[in-house]
Image (cartoon, rainbow, N blue to C red):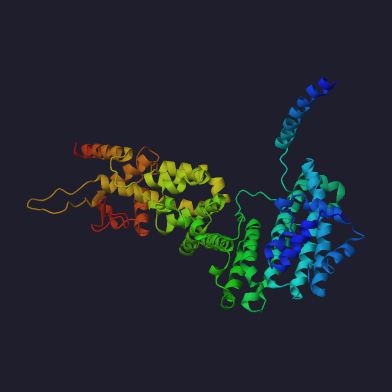
Amino acid sequence: MSNELDSLWADFATAYNTPDGYLLATTISPEPPKSDSARLYNWQRWTNSYSIQTDLRYKLQYNPDLHLEKKEASTWLDVFTAYYSFAGKLLSAEEAQNAGKSRDADWNAVYESWKEVLSALYRGYSNNVFAAWTIPCLYVVGKYLRVFAIKADDNAASQRDSGLAFGALQEEDAFGAASKNEKLEDAARQINRIFALCLSDRSEVQYSRKWALYYIANLLFKTYFKLNSISLSKNILRSLKASGSDMPPLSAFPKAHQVTFKYYSGVISFLEEDYATAEEFLVSAYEMCNIHATKNLQLILTYLIPTKLLTSHRLPTSTLLQQSPALERLLGPICTAIRRADLRAFNAALEHGEEEFVKRRIYLTLERGRDITLRNLFRKVFLAGGYEPLKEGETGPAVRRTRVPVREFAAALQMAGAEVGDGEGGVDVDEVECLIANGIYKNFVKGYIARERGIVVLSKGGAFPGTGV
Amino acid sequence: MSGATASSAPTTKLQDPTDSSKSQSAQPQKPAAQLEEDDEFEDFPVEDWTKEEEVSAQQANTHLWEESWDDDDTNDEFSVQLKEELKKMEGQRKG
């Protein structure tokens, strides 16, 4: 037996004797540690399927550095046996991929064999053999189960597309009800089992698997988002809420878990149009986020910016937008259009970004920025109207003109590119009045329309609430 | 004889590194267990960090939000045009 795997077993022993769950989790990870990049190859060559049981027993039960209970040792033996078989599948898939034959990579087999690792590990917890400090192992199995599921589904999809499946499969299988996310749906069920396993732990909080709940919940959110079954996330939120009193507070969890949880909670509220709650979660996620996590910051802001637009009608400063070129490109044009009250530019920005806005599920929220663009436009008309001439003997602050002819709004709308034409070169006054009435109804404008006189009578005390005039 | 081996040695030494760097750049080999999704929240490389590493602790993050209207700059291009247009309308009405 070679010494090439000394680092794995040394890490395993150190992890147990410390104890250090994160180090322990690296010993069953599909990604080798940076310090030992050949670990998986060496692990594969370390033994063979005939002598693996003996070799493992030697390392786990008769290892002088380790003092595992018999039950614990035999559970780890199961885990590592599954891990051994998995490593072989992963390495051949990797080999096919690196040789440019990604279609030959059998991600299905990788997925199934990794699921065996998960099951062996799961039994360790459900039989109460593994202590709570080992939970990072659950993070690793859950995280990669999802990764391999996506790869397996992608692979199946590309085989279906290329017609390869016809030769290998019966026709009914090829056209069967199998979903295009078959493995990912299965992965969601497995990860949900892990969630239930942790939720049901009745041990004292200090020694409870409940410390894994936010990590696993985040993994489920990620999976449900990918599956487009966002509503399922709400079941998870409900379960977490229901066990609130038996749980450590969110603030006691690692910041990585907190920020991710707040991000997903924020996006879920955003999609339910509960913008006040969304803002609370997203602001909190943004503030706590690690400064180096640029991609995550960008994602948080992708939802926080449209949220702020609706809750407080505020826009990001250029300082904020310029932190991320991708964000600047995505939301810069539409924000500028709103600020300048440029309807034409607003429509162009919305149309130009439509595909990406829809993909990120922010289109409908951004579209509501049109009301604010209109508010800003009407405000410009109000400001351009200047002040009432002072009457004789009058002193004091000048008063803005509050009786504004509808045709002035019509002119501004036409200049800004609103579609208020009557088709014959004139203006559809009804359409103009409708836009103004809508602004009044939504409380962007205070006043009323005196139709018979063709003027808008604006409030003398704050015609445009919250904008200083 | 010994001169010939000495002269050929540097050439092979020079070629090797260029060859290997070429093949590396042609085919970047990523660990197979990694996934790239452009719109997905990423795993943080660390589980926890200090208060100083939080965004909220950064100086540059003080002025983040502003009002959504052009601040009373009534001389921007649009406002000037608008005033002209209104003046024209006023003239037409009187005339």
Front-most of A242 and A199? A199
Judge left or right: residue A166 versus residue A308. right
| Residue A49 position in % (x across, y down) | 90, 58
Res. A173 in view? no
Q: Nearer the viewer, residue A348 or A406?
A: A348
Say above or below: B18 vs A111.
above
Expressed as whole percent of the image width and height from the top left, the position of residue A282 reads: 50, 59
Residue A443 in percent (x, y) is at 35, 59
Is the C terminus of chain A in the top left, top right, bottom left or bottom right quadrant? Answer: bottom left
- Residue at image position (37%, 55%) is A438
| Residue sitting farthest toward the right | A50
Residue at 53% across, 46% down: A354
Residue A325 seen: yes
> As drawn, is A208 to the left or to the right of A167?
left
Question: At x 76% / y 26%, what residue is drawn?
Answer: B10
Asked which quadrant contains residue B77, the reply is top left
Judge by depth and name the residue closer to the eye, A466 or A72. A72
Most extreme residue toward the front is B2
- Residue B9 location, quadrant: top right
Q: Nearer the viewer, residue A285 or A339?
A: A285
Q: Count numbered badges in the picture.
A: 0
Q: Position of residue A144 (x, y in %)?
A: 71, 57
Locate the N terminus of chain A and report the quarter of the image it occupies. bottom right
In screen coordinates, is A194 left or right of A250?
right
